[in-house]
Amino acid sequence: MLLMIAAVPLETNQLRCQLQDSREQRLGSYRIFSGTIHTQKLLLAHCGVGQNAMAIQLTRLLQQFQPQAVLLCGCAGSYPHSGLTNGDIAIASEEVCGDLG
């Protein structure tokens, strides 16, 4: 199973629409969604904004599930001059903690 995690549900909306055999459950205060896309088992989860929220929810997810890989996805909404629009793909080669200044 592949785990994809994002801060807020808006960031996974397009993926959730593609899930086949979708199931919803709760983990902490968040809904998580499981299903398949092109035969790939997928778990979509949300964690809230910020590094602490991500660390807490990811720890919960790793304790309950055993994913083969974890991918962080998002909409880069904090960076309006990035030139990206919803549905575009950007792959980071490094991460600078922009939310911390």
Image (cartoon, rainbow, N blue to C red):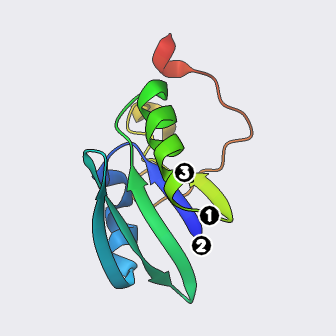
Q: Return the residue found at the far front.
A: 63
The residue carrying pointer 1 sits among few (fewer than 14), some (14 to 19) or many (20 or more) residues within 10 Å by Cα, namely some
Q: In the picture shown, does residue 97 fall above or below 90?
A: above
Kind of element beneath mark 1:
loop
Tag 3 secondary structure: helix
Q: Callout 2: 10 Å neighbours few (<14), some, many (20+)?
A: some
Q: Secondary structure at mark 2?
A: loop
**Residue 84 relative to residue 8: left or right:** right
Above or below, comparing residue 72 to residue 68 in the picture: above
Residue at (38% x, 80% y) in the render: 18
- The residue wearing badge 3 is 63
- Tell me where residue 31 appears, x and y as whole percent: 28, 57
Q: CA distance from mark 1 to mark 2?
A: 5 Å
For the residues bearing labels 2 and 3, Cβ distance under 8 angstroms: no
Q: Amino acid at mark 1?
A: Pro
Q: State which tag comes first along the sequence, 1 or 2.
A: 2
Which residue is pictured at 45% across the width and 32% down the height?
81
Crowding near the residue tagged with mark 3, few <14, some 14–19, many ≥20 C-alpha atoms within 10 Å: few
In percent of width and height, residue 3 lies at 54, 61
Q: Are marks 1 and 2 in contact (CB under 8 Å)?
A: yes
**Residue 67 bears which disc, if any?**
1
Spatial CA distance of label 2 from label 3 is 14 Å
| Quadrant into which the N terminus falls | bottom right
Q: Which image quarter: residue 93?
A: top right
In the rendered structure, which amino acid carries the disc numbered 3?
Gln
Q: Nearer the viewer, residue 53 or 89?
A: 53
